[in-house]
Amino acid sequence: MRPTTLFLLALMALSPAAAAAQDAGDATIAMADDAEPDEVEVEAVDPLAPRDAQGLTLDEFLWVARPIVVFADTPADPRFVEQMELLSQRPEALLERDVVIIVDTDPSARSDIRTALRPRGFSIVIVAKDGSVGLRRPAPRDVREIIRAIDNFQLRQEEIRAGG
Protein backbone atom coordinates (compact mmCIF):
# COMPACT_ATOMS: atom_id res chain seq x y z
CA MET A 1 0.00 0.00 0.00
CA ARG A 2 1.19 3.54 -0.75
CA PRO A 3 1.92 5.81 2.24
CA THR A 4 -0.88 8.23 1.27
CA THR A 5 -3.37 5.37 1.16
CA LEU A 6 -2.28 4.26 4.62
CA PHE A 7 -2.61 7.84 5.84
CA LEU A 8 -6.13 8.09 4.44
CA LEU A 9 -7.18 4.79 5.93
CA ALA A 10 -5.90 5.94 9.30
CA LEU A 11 -7.83 9.19 9.00
CA MET A 12 -11.02 7.39 8.04
CA ALA A 13 -10.68 5.06 11.00
CA LEU A 14 -11.15 7.86 13.51
CA SER A 15 -12.72 6.56 16.67
CA PRO A 16 -16.13 7.97 17.65
CA ALA A 17 -14.46 9.66 20.63
CA ALA A 18 -11.96 11.45 18.40
CA ALA A 19 -14.72 12.50 16.00
CA ALA A 20 -16.82 13.84 18.88
CA ALA A 21 -13.81 15.68 20.27
CA GLN A 22 -13.12 17.15 16.85
CA ASP A 23 -16.66 18.52 16.69
CA ALA A 24 -15.96 20.37 19.93
CA GLY A 25 -12.94 22.23 18.52
CA ASP A 26 -9.23 21.97 17.87
CA ALA A 27 -8.30 20.35 21.16
CA THR A 28 -9.96 18.16 23.71
CA ILE A 29 -9.21 17.35 27.30
CA ALA A 30 -8.84 13.66 28.03
CA MET A 31 -8.58 12.11 31.46
CA ALA A 32 -7.20 8.62 31.97
CA ASP A 33 -9.44 6.21 33.90
CA ASP A 34 -6.99 6.05 36.80
CA ALA A 35 -5.97 9.73 36.72
CA GLU A 36 -6.74 12.18 39.47
CA PRO A 37 -9.09 15.03 38.48
CA ASP A 38 -6.19 17.50 38.50
CA GLU A 39 -4.11 15.31 36.14
CA VAL A 40 -5.44 16.21 32.71
CA GLU A 41 -3.78 15.83 29.32
CA VAL A 42 -4.61 17.92 26.29
CA GLU A 43 -4.97 15.97 23.06
CA ALA A 44 -4.56 17.86 19.78
CA VAL A 45 -7.13 17.16 17.08
CA ASP A 46 -6.42 17.75 13.40
CA PRO A 47 -9.01 20.25 12.12
CA LEU A 48 -8.74 18.76 8.63
CA ALA A 49 -9.21 15.14 9.66
CA PRO A 50 -12.24 13.91 7.73
CA ARG A 51 -15.43 13.84 9.76
CA ASP A 52 -18.17 11.32 9.14
CA ALA A 53 -21.39 13.00 7.98
CA GLN A 54 -23.51 10.78 10.21
CA GLY A 55 -24.75 12.89 13.12
CA LEU A 56 -23.66 16.21 11.57
CA THR A 57 -25.74 18.93 9.93
CA LEU A 58 -24.65 21.74 7.64
CA ASP A 59 -26.16 24.24 10.10
CA GLU A 60 -23.35 23.40 12.56
CA PHE A 61 -20.88 25.03 10.16
CA LEU A 62 -22.98 28.06 9.17
CA TRP A 63 -20.83 31.24 9.27
CA VAL A 64 -18.00 29.24 10.93
CA ALA A 65 -16.44 26.98 8.29
CA ARG A 66 -16.61 25.97 4.65
CA PRO A 67 -17.49 22.26 4.49
CA ILE A 68 -16.04 20.23 1.67
CA VAL A 69 -18.32 17.21 1.52
CA VAL A 70 -17.07 14.13 -0.32
CA PHE A 71 -19.78 11.62 -1.16
CA ALA A 72 -19.39 8.09 -2.50
CA ASP A 73 -21.44 4.91 -2.42
CA THR A 74 -18.53 3.06 -0.77
CA PRO A 75 -15.16 4.04 0.73
CA ALA A 76 -13.57 1.70 -1.84
CA ASP A 77 -14.68 3.96 -4.74
CA PRO A 78 -11.42 4.88 -6.56
CA ARG A 79 -12.69 8.45 -7.07
CA PHE A 80 -13.25 8.77 -3.31
CA VAL A 81 -9.75 7.48 -2.54
CA GLU A 82 -8.25 9.83 -5.14
CA GLN A 83 -10.18 12.83 -3.77
CA MET A 84 -9.04 12.14 -0.22
CA GLU A 85 -5.43 11.87 -1.42
CA LEU A 86 -5.76 15.17 -3.28
CA LEU A 87 -7.19 16.91 -0.20
CA SER A 88 -4.30 15.70 1.95
CA GLN A 89 -1.67 17.25 -0.34
CA ARG A 90 -2.09 20.95 0.60
CA PRO A 91 -3.70 21.18 4.05
CA GLU A 92 -2.34 24.65 4.85
CA ALA A 93 -4.23 26.23 1.93
CA LEU A 94 -7.45 24.60 3.14
CA LEU A 95 -6.88 25.62 6.77
CA GLU A 96 -6.33 29.20 5.65
CA ARG A 97 -9.83 29.14 4.14
CA ASP A 98 -11.60 27.65 7.20
CA VAL A 99 -12.30 24.34 5.47
CA VAL A 100 -13.68 21.29 7.23
CA ILE A 101 -13.76 17.95 5.40
CA ILE A 102 -16.85 15.78 5.73
CA VAL A 103 -17.19 12.33 4.19
CA ASP A 104 -20.29 10.27 3.53
CA THR A 105 -19.74 6.84 2.00
CA ASP A 106 -22.92 5.14 3.21
CA PRO A 107 -26.02 6.07 1.18
CA SER A 108 -28.22 3.74 3.24
CA ALA A 109 -27.46 5.70 6.43
CA ARG A 110 -29.26 8.75 4.99
CA SER A 111 -27.31 11.37 6.90
CA ASP A 112 -28.82 14.85 7.21
CA ILE A 113 -26.06 16.20 4.98
CA ARG A 114 -26.73 13.58 2.28
CA THR A 115 -30.44 14.35 2.46
CA ALA A 116 -29.78 18.10 2.15
CA LEU A 117 -27.28 17.88 -0.75
CA ARG A 118 -28.79 14.86 -2.58
CA PRO A 119 -25.70 13.48 -4.38
CA ARG A 120 -25.72 10.67 -6.90
CA GLY A 121 -22.76 8.34 -6.61
CA PHE A 122 -19.44 10.15 -6.21
CA SER A 123 -19.64 13.89 -5.69
CA ILE A 124 -17.62 16.67 -4.11
CA VAL A 125 -19.60 19.62 -2.80
CA ILE A 126 -18.15 22.82 -1.35
CA VAL A 127 -20.54 24.70 0.89
CA ALA A 128 -19.96 28.40 1.52
CA LYS A 129 -20.04 29.85 5.03
CA ASP A 130 -23.52 31.22 4.34
CA GLY A 131 -24.78 27.67 3.68
CA SER A 132 -25.09 27.96 -0.09
CA VAL A 133 -23.55 25.40 -2.44
CA GLY A 134 -20.53 27.03 -4.03
CA LEU A 135 -19.29 24.12 -6.13
CA ARG A 136 -20.60 20.67 -6.99
CA ARG A 137 -18.60 18.26 -9.16
CA PRO A 138 -19.03 14.57 -10.08
CA ALA A 139 -15.28 13.93 -10.30
CA PRO A 140 -12.27 14.50 -8.02
CA ARG A 141 -10.75 17.99 -7.92
CA ASP A 142 -7.30 19.06 -6.82
CA VAL A 143 -6.76 21.55 -4.01
CA ARG A 144 -5.68 24.27 -6.44
CA GLU A 145 -9.07 24.18 -8.17
CA ILE A 146 -10.90 23.96 -4.84
CA ILE A 147 -9.13 26.99 -3.35
CA ARG A 148 -9.65 28.94 -6.56
CA ALA A 149 -13.40 28.24 -6.29
CA ILE A 150 -13.45 29.19 -2.60
CA ASP A 151 -11.52 32.39 -3.29
CA ASN A 152 -14.29 33.38 -5.72
CA PHE A 153 -17.02 33.07 -3.06
CA GLN A 154 -18.37 36.50 -2.11
CA LEU A 155 -17.70 36.09 1.62
CA ARG A 156 -14.13 34.93 0.93
CA GLN A 157 -13.59 38.02 -1.25
CA GLU A 158 -14.70 40.14 1.71
CA GLU A 159 -12.33 38.23 4.02
CA ILE A 160 -9.45 38.84 1.61
CA ARG A 161 -10.23 42.58 1.43
CA ALA A 162 -10.41 42.74 5.25
CA GLY A 163 -6.99 41.07 5.44
CA GLY A 164 -8.12 37.66 6.72
Image (cartoon, grey):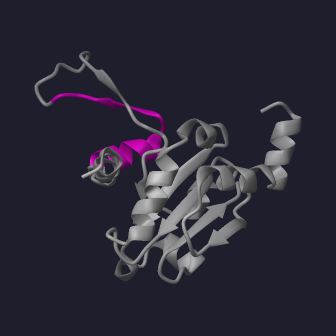
For this orientation, the residue located farthest to the right is 161
What residue is drawn where x is 26% and y is 16%?
38
Coordinates of residue 159 in the picture (x, y in percent): 81, 40
Relative to residue 88, is residue 74 drawn left or right?
Answer: left
- Bounds of the magenta span? 17-32
For this orientation, the residue located farthest to the top is 38
For this orientation, the residue located farthest to the front is 2
What residue is drawn where x is 28% and y is 20%?
40
Coordinates of residue 61 in the picture (x, y in percent): 60, 54
Coordinates of residue 62 in the picture (x, y in percent): 66, 55
Coordinates of residue 65 in the picture (x, y in percent): 63, 48
Q: Nearer the viewer, residue 7 or 134?
A: 7
Q: Nearer the viewer, residue 164 or 144?
A: 144
What residue is drawn where x is 69% and y is 49%?
147
What residue is drawn where x is 72% and y is 66%?
132
For this orientation, the residue located farthest to the left is 34
Q: Is residue 72 above or below residue 39?
A: below
Relative to residue 70, is residue 30 drawn left or right?
Answer: left
Q: Is residue 83 above or below residue 3?
A: below
Relative to residue 121, is residue 32 drawn left or right?
Answer: left
Based on the picture, tell me whether residue 57 belongs to the magenta stretch: no
Quadrant of the frame with the C terminus: top right
Q: Count the marks: how many? A: 0
Whether residue 32 is visible:
yes
- The image quadrant that residue 32 belongs to is top left
